[in-house]
Amino acid sequence: MSSDNPTSDFFENLAGDAQPLEGEARAPSSLKSRIYSALVRLQASSGPLLGLRECQEAGHGLCVFEQLVRIAPVGEQFKAMNPCQVCHARVLAEWFDNAPIYWPNCPYVKFQER
C-alpha cells in the first residue's frame, strides 16, 4: 500500500482502522447544506451553471424563487446564476438544523431532518 503520497497512505491507514457505526449515522442538516453550497460555488467557478429553463426542462423542479427568476424579464446570463446564493433559505439551512423553510423544490428543505 505504500505509495509516493504520504497523505494518501495516512488516509488509507485511517480508513482501515475505522469501525462501522452502530445504527444509522446521519450528518446534521446544516452540514449537508454547507457542503451543498460549497459544491455549487465550486461548480459555478468553473463556468456558467445550466439555465433555470434548461433545469426545468430536464425534469428538475424549481423553488418559488427560482421560478420568479425564470419568468423575470432579465438576460439568460442572470438566469444561469445560482439564486440560492442570495436566498434566505440557504442562510437558515446552513446555520440551523430543522430550519423553518418548507417550499417545494428547495434543495435545502431536502436536507432538513423532518
Image (cartoon, helix red, strand yellow):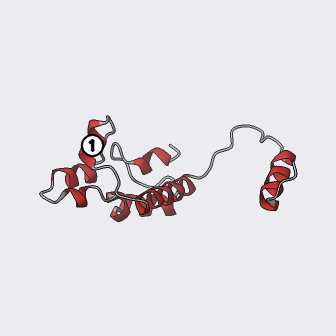
Image location of residue 109, percent across then percent down:
43, 48
Is 90 on the left or on the right of 114, as rendered?
Answer: left
Type of amino acid at the residue the image marks with label 1: Glu
In the image, 30 versus 78, the foreground residue is 78
> Which residue lies at the image location 41% right of the left edge and 48% below the top edge?
107
Q: Is residue 34 above or below residue 51?
A: below
Would you call the spot at circle 1 few (<14 residues within 10 Å), some (14-19), or many (20 or more)?
A: few
Residue positioned most to the front = 4
In the foreground, 3 or 99: 3
Residue 114 percent location from the top left of the image? 50, 43
Residue under label 1: 54
Question: The residue tagged with tag 1: helix, strand or loop?
Answer: helix
The image shows residue 42 at horizontal and vertical percentages of 48, 60
Residue under the point 53% across and 45% down: 113
Which quadrant holds residue 73? bottom left
Above or below, 75 relative to 67: below
Which residue is at a point 77% across and 42% down the rendered structure image? 21
Q: Which residue occupies the foreground of this view, 10 or 6?
A: 6
Give the residue furthest to the top: 59
